[in-house]
Image (spheres, helix red, strand yellow):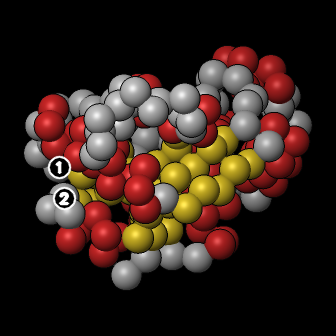
Amino acid sequence: MGELLRAIRFRRWDRPDAEWLPAGQIHADPLADLNTVDSTLSIWLVDDEANLDRIATALAANRDDLDKVDCALIDEQVLAASGFSLEPSEGDTPDSEANKLWHRNVMKLSGDGLVHLATVILENMKRKGYGREDVQGLIAQGLASKRIDYAKLKKKMKERFPQQ
């Protein structure tokens, strides 16, 4: 079993000023990083450091502009033990191989289930961050190796990485 990755924004999850919350509850900001479609949440399977970097590259290359990438990593067994079911599903990034190999969906999420998922992530996540310069280098490498499909980049990202 591996780990699962969800791109988040660390600042939404870090709330030392939330002492006003009752025990066992989390603040609402992390939910903004867990947007769903048809009650499913996109998540990625991480096998090792190499595919972790590749997934982060794919996610970064799918953005409108160059920015840092914050990742929450959670053990796949923790998610399964918490009652969440995963299904393989093709992702939607400029890295078609990563989309096929490592993308998963957390299925059948209710509103309460999404809050429970956020709590499980908050209590169990490991963090991996990629700075803007790291992301720039990873995307450049992905483009050079043809793992990232230039045609699938968004307009502003194409301006950052003119085709050669």
- Residue 145 higher or lower than 135, as above or below: below
What residue lies at 80% left-to-right and 20% top-to-bottom?
Answer: 159
Q: Amino acid at mark 2?
A: Phe
Position of the N terminus by quadrant: bottom left
Q: Is residue 69 visible?
A: yes
Closer to the camera in the image, 66 or 75: 75
Compared with residue 24, is residue 141 higher up or lower down, i.e. above or below? below
In the image, what residue occupies the spot 52% across and 44% down?
A: 7
Q: Is residue 152 visible?
A: no
Q: Which residue is mark 1?
A: 107
Name the spot of residue 96 as percent of width and height, x first: 50, 52
Of 20 and 126, which appears nearest the observer?
A: 20
Which structural element holds mark 2? loop
* Quarter of the rendering containing residue 22: top left
Of mark 1 and mark 2, the one earlier in the sequence is: 2
Give me the residue at 43% from left, 61% from top.
Answer: 124
Amino acid residing under circle 1: Met
Callout 1: helix, strand or loop? loop
* Residue 128 rendering spot, x and y as whole percentages: 65, 56
Q: How many angstroms separate mark 1 from mark 2 (CA)?
A: 7 Å
The C terminus: image quadrant: top right
The residue that disc 2 covers is 84
Neighbour tally class for label 1: few under 14, some 14-19, many 20 plus, Cα within 10 Å:
some
Q: Give yes or no for contact between labels 1 and 2 (Cβ–Cβ under 8 Å).
A: yes
Total marks shown come to 2
Q: Is residue 153 left or right of residue 121?
A: right
